[in-house]
Amino acid sequence: MTPAPVIDVHGLTKRYGERTVVDHLDLVVERGRIVGFLGPNGSGKTTTIRMLCGLLTPDGGEGTCLGYDLRRDAAAIKREVGYMTQRFSLYDDLTIEENLDFVARVYAVPARRRAVEASLDRLSLGGRRRQLAGTLSGGWKQRLALASCMLHSPQLLLLDEPTAGVDPRARRDFWDEIHALAAQGITVLVSTHYMDEAERCHRLAYIAWGRLLASGTAEDVIAGSRLSTWVVSAATGESELTQLSARLREAPGVTTLVTLGATLRISALDPAAIAPTLEELRASPTLTVAAAQPSLEDVFVALIRGSSDREH
């Protein structure tokens, strides 16, 4: 028998006045999966996460989280999920240990002292247990926030941009821990803007303007984008590419144009429309044009542009 999804919502909708922030969103997350929740700022990611963890009541739609009904069982959901907010939300004037002890008391964690000690050990916080949280770097605050999320042994983690502003090494360590948790059967829904983090997720869900635009594995999302991509380099260096970039942005058929170092990445939804432009580029003795596999970043830039065009 296939286990029920940890998150299973359909038509999820949230409005503030006349503004629809989340618009009939469908989302299914299987147990033990790491799902990357992506989208531009203001796309509705945080509002969705707050509805899933019982902090906001949907205006439309239905579904369950950990088997609990989103509307009827919000209090039970709050007790059983681990929610890590965008901003550090613990107490700066308490030590690491005091913060964890406070959270354990709030959740009425059995054997509280033992749970705090285990949490300190798991996230390598023991050596800093008496350090004030307000004096921690971004990476250590991140560890403390994750430790506090795990104190009551949740089976679902909802992480809202947990690595924003954290250095690359701390981000890598954080993701190693997330994968270790998933290997134990814990489910993770994590919002992120980093493409390298998106590639570490088992599945992706991309939203803009409150609507789900793409979902599936990274390979599924790339294949479903219908993008074709080319890389352009110049023998004369970056100056020629800079001038070329300005000219190509309005060229027929160009969906996205991104400068990456000494190359331009051009993507198009309609290869026939962009064919004359590519032929013109290939005719230049100083330019090299090569077909390339679209990246997740190419796809997401195209999705942002497409959703913005539809709204305006």
Image: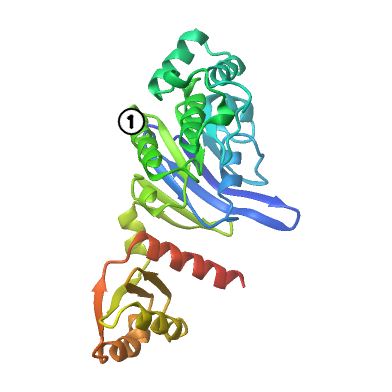
Residue 261 position, x and y percent, is 34, 68
Residue under the image location 40 percent in, 71 percent down:
258
User: Observer-nearest residue: 100 or 30?
Assistant: 100
The answer to whether 239 is drawn above or below residue 177 in the figure is: below
Q: Quadrant of the C terminus?
A: bottom right
The answer to whether 296 is drawn above or below residue 231 in the figure is: above
User: Observer-nearest residue: 106 or 53?
Assistant: 106
**Helix, strand or loop status at disc 1:** helix
Residue under the image location 31 percent in, 86 percent down:
278
Crowding around mark 1 (Cα neighbors within 10 Å: few <14, some 14 to 19, many 20+) is few
User: 239 left or right of 101?
Assistant: left
- Tell me which amino acid carries mark 1: Ala
Identify the residue position indicated by label 1 in the image.
180
Residue 77 position, x and y percent, is 57, 28
User: Observer-nearest residue: 8 or 150?
Assistant: 150
- Toward which corner of the image does residue 169 lie, by quadrant? top left
